[in-house]
Image (spheres, rainbow, N blue to C red):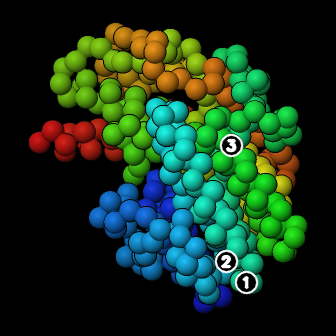
Amino acid sequence: MSTEDPRPVLVTGAGGFIGGHLVGSLLADGHAVRAIDLKPERRWYQHHNGAINVVADLRLRDAAFAAVAGTKSIYNLACNMGGMGFIESNKAACMLNVLIDTHLLEAARDEQLDSYFYASTACVYPGYLQHDPDATALKEADTYPADPEDGYGWQKLFGERLCLNFGQDYGIPVRVGRYHNVYGPEGTWDGGREKAPAAICRKVAEAVLSGGTEIEVWGDGEQSRSFMYVDDGVEGTRRLASSSIDTPLNIGSSELVTINQLVDIVSSIGGIELERRHIAAAPQGVRGRNSDNTEVQSKLGWQPSISLRSGLERTYAWIYDQVAASQR
């Protein structure tokens, strides 16, 4: 994508976590950016004055067509979602994201785009492959027979098929990235939509600030995940978007940890030892999930490079400041 093209890059979900970081990266490289989100601008996680910032509901067809008009490429990150606690109790709301995907692709047919990037998720992978905490890393070819996460996973899998079919039928240069548990600063850290790294960073920070001795952990803490720092996620996103790869690729770390190990790392960063109180009835998702990066290494010559501890150090510092500020 050349910065000599005066048309803007469209980033949907720009007021969200990954979207805010992506807008900043594109602006830093000289791109004009049209940044769109449903939330009022005061609630955007990052607000970049150099972008054309627009509040719009892309579930509405006219709004989606207006957003796409005159753009050179699209990063579709718009999605009503959150951590496991949110997606397990808001399945219908997650499914309605298909309206955004449908309207944006319909609008994209009429534009001469360099690329259309679709933010998918590891939640599209079958549940029957994710019963063991000692998880076998998930390959792109593992997607079918389909058994994705109910609600959110099904919506994203349908969104992938929609992108691939629009690419085949109308020549839209679609690129699909499957994110694996992205974390970092400038994102959700409380309120119920936060994911495990942010939630644990918050709980540790609260204990440090209050003198607490206990941390709540959902489940037995032996469920496993790989977590990718947001800077790696943005780099992988942009590399894939500017490639010619028209099949889905994992964008995720292959550094597998249990939730208990995640607590250990964050507690160490916070300089505190905490007794764990396990909540067996809390939402936990699949038992184990990891990213196989063979394809992304082969096709893009890249994989995430920021270690979990390094990324968590940056994330904890930011969330600690947010917690401290909220208590003043």
Horizontal side of 324 relative to 253 (left or right) equals: left
- Residue 318 vs residue 89, the one in the foreground: 89
Q: Which residue is at a point 83% across and 55% down the rendered structure image?
A: 247
Asked if disc 2 and disc 3 are in contact, CB closer than 8 Å, the reply is no
- The quadrant the N terminus occupies is bottom right
Q: Which residue is at a point 80% across and 47% down the rendered structure image?
A: 297
Residue 89, percent across and down?
48, 34
In space, the residues marked 2 and 3 are separated at their CA atoms by: 23 Å
For residue 72, which quarter of the picture?
bottom right
- The quadrant the C terminus occupies is top left
For residue 243, which quarter of the picture?
bottom right
- Residue indicated by mark 2: 107
As helix, strand or loop, the secondary structure at mark 2 comes to: helix
Asked if residue 117 is positioned above or below residue 181 in the image, the reply reads below
| Amino acid marked by disc 3 | Trp
Residue 164, percent across and down?
81, 60
Q: Which mark is residue 110?
A: 1
For residue 107, which quarter of the picture?
bottom right
In space, the residues marked 1 and 3 are separated at their CA atoms by: 27 Å
Q: Which residue is at a point 80% across and 67% down the rendered structure image?
A: 166
Residue 14 appearing in the image: yes
Residue 4, percent across and down?
65, 88
Along the polypeptide, which appears first: circle 2 or circle 3? 2
Crowd class of label 3 (few under 14; some 14 to 19; many from 20; radius 10 Å): many
| Amino acid marked by disc 2 | Ala
Asked if residue 263 is positioned above or below residue 148 in the image, the reply reads above
Q: Which mark is residue 154?
A: 3
